[in-house]
Image (cartoon, grey):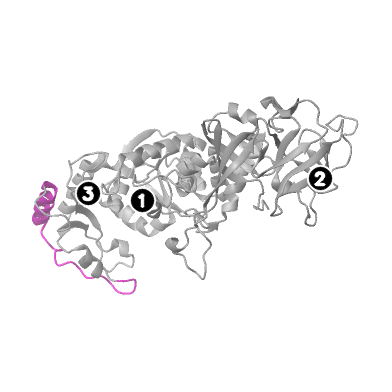
Amino acid sequence: MANNFIEAIVENDLENNVHEEILTRFPPEPNGYLHIGHAKSLCINFGIKEKYHGKCNLRYDDTNPTKEDVEYVESIKEDIRWLGFEWDKECYASDYFEETYQLALKLIKQGDAYVCDLSAEEIKATRGSLTEPGTESPYRNRSVEENLKLFTEMREGKYPDGSKVLRAKIDMSSSNLNMRDPVIYRILRATHHHTGDAWLIYPMYDFAHPIEDALEGITHSICTLEFEDHRPLYDWVTEHCGFVNPPHQYEFARLNIKNTIMSKRYLKKLVDTGVVEGWDDPRMPTISGMRMRGYPAEAIREFCSVVGVAKANSEVDPAVLEHCVRDVLNDSADRVMAVEDPLLIVIENAGERETITLVNNPNHPENGTHEIPFEKEIYIERSDFAVVPPPKYHRLVPGGMVRLKGAYILRYLSHEEDENGKVLFVRCELIPDSKEGGVNAGIKVKGVVQWVPKSCAVSATLNKYESLLLDEVDGNKQFDDRINPESLKTVEGALVEPWVMDKNVGDRFQFMRSAYYKLAKKQDGKLLFYRIVGLKDSFNKQ
C-alpha cells in the first residue's frame, strides 16, 4: 500500500502497465558532501526500488567542472552505502556528453536552438519579469547553417569563455521565465574530474538532466519542489529531442530543519573558513558529519520515514531527528557509568575491594554483563552532592542517603571544603547488606547515582556539540550572523568505568543519567568521546 503520493503514482503506473519495471535515480552534483536533506531523496528513490522491486541508478550530475571533485564523488558513494543502499548502475552526466551534444545539433537543425553572443548580464537584462515579457536576442534569427558553424566552433575552442552560448528557441513572452530562451550550453575551459580536458563546452543542468533521464530509461524522475517551475522545460527538451515514452518529473517538498544549514555552498564556506574542521565535523548536518558524531544509519532512515513525503514545504524541528537517534540508541547502546565533574567519596567502613556486576544493556540480556571494582574511595558526579540542596533534590545531602548504582546505599557522615567553599571530598558510610537481594536492600532511598572507582577509573575527554546556528533574532536569517560560538564545548577530566578500555573506537554508549556518547579515540590510556544526543526527549510523538 502506498505511503505517499509518489508511491501512489508508481502503483497506478504498475497496475496500468505503464511500466513493466520501475527505475529511479539519485542524481547528486559532486560539488560537496551529502547532507541530511539528501538523505530524504535517497530514502525516496531507493525506497521505491526496494518496495516495488525496481532499480535505482546513482548518477553524478557533473556538468559544472569548476566546482566538482573526485573527493566528493567518493564521499557520496560512502554515504549511500553507509545508509544501507546500493545502486544498480553508476552513471555520470559526462558519460552522455557526446549524445547531449548531438541532440543540441538536432535542435539547431530543427530551428529550436541558436547561438547567442549576448553576455550573461545582457541575457538577464532582456529576460523580462513576471509581469513583462522578455526581449528577443538580436541573434535569435540566425540561420541554421550559421548556428551549426558557430556551435561547432564553440566546441573546437575558437571563442573565449563567456563570449557565446547556445540557447533554446522557445518563447520570450512565456509566463514561465524558465521558458524564455534558456541557455543550454556555455563555453568553459576547465579540467573535468571525469573527462579531463576533452570538452570546452558544457551543457546546462536543465538541458542535460532530462536527456540523461531519457537515455537511462528512468520511469520516475523525482526531485524537490524548487524544480516544479522547471518541469515545462524538462518536458520541452525530451519532446523536441524526439524521445519516445519520455520520463516524467515529480516534485516533493524538500527537507528543511530549523537552525540547520541545508546549503552545500554555505557548508563549504564553513569548511573553507575553518569554522568547522571539515565536511565530517560532528557538528555538520552532512551524512559524514552525523556518522562521525555517532548517529546510527537506521535512525536517519527512520527520521526520513517520520517526516514523510509531502507536496508543501515545511520546517521540521531538530528534536524529531534527535528522537529517532535516541530511540535507536536506547535499544542498542550499552550502559556505562561516567562522571563528568568528579567528586571524591571516602567510604569509611568499606571492606576489602570487591567486584560489582552490571548488566551491559537491560534491553538485551544477551549482551552480557561486565564487572567494576568497588572500593573505599570512589567518585560521583559533583552535582550529585549539595550542601544546601534545591527543592526536590533527591541525591546526597548532609544527613541523607543515596544509592550507588548496582551497589550499596551510602549515608552521609561529613565533608570538607576549601577556602572558597568548594567541596573537596565527602565522607560516607555504607549500609551493610544493602545491595540488591540483601537484608537492607529495601531501605527507601529516592536517589540513585552513578560512580567510578578511584584506583582504576579511566580519564576521558568529552566533546559536547550544539547546533551550529543560533535562533533567528528579529527576522535575521543570515547564517554569518547566527554562527554559534559555543557549538563545541570540550570537557577535560571526566572519568569512566575501566571496562570501556576494552571496547572499540566507534562503539556507542549511554552514559547513565547523562547522554549518549560515541568512543571516538583511544590513545595513551585516555579516551575521547563525542556526545551524540542527550537522554531527554523533547519530541512529542502525538
Quadrant assignment for the N terminus? top right
Q: Is residue 126 above or below residue 256?
A: below
Crowding at dot 1, Cα within 10 Å, few <14 / some 14-19 / many 20+, comes out as few
Secondary structure under tag 2 reads strand
Crowding at dot 2, Cα within 10 Å, few <14 / some 14-19 / many 20+, comes out as some
Q: Quadrant of residue 338?
A: top right
Rounded to the nearest angstrom, the CA distance separating label 3 from label 2 is: 78 Å
Q: Nearer the viewer, mark 3 or mark 1?
A: 1
The answer to whether the residues at label 3 and label 1 have Cβ atoms under 8 Å apart is no
| Residue 2's disc number | none
Among all residues in the image, which is located at the extreme front?
A: 419
Instruction: Tell whether position 133 is magenta.
Output: yes
Could you tell which of marks 1 and 2 lies nearer the N-terminus?
Answer: 1
Left or right position of 115 against 4: left
The answer to whether residue 21 of the structure is visible from this angle is no
Give the camera-side residue of 450 and 305: 450
Among all residues in the image, which is located at the extreme bottom?
A: 131
Rounded to the nearest angstrom, the CA distance separating label 1 from label 2 is: 55 Å
Secondary structure under tag 3 reads strand
Task: Tell me which segment is drawn in magenta.
Answer: 129-156
Where residue 86 appears, as percent x and y from the top left, is 44, 33
Report the residue at 76% width, 37% height from top: 346
Left or right position of 458 against 383: left
Where residue 342 appears, as percent x and y from the top left, is 67, 42
Could you tell which of marks 3 and 1 lies nearer the N-terminus?
Answer: 3
Q: Which residue is mark 3?
A: 202
Rounded to the nearest angstrom, the CA distance separating label 3 from label 1 is: 27 Å
Instruction: Tell whether position 424 is magenta.
Output: no
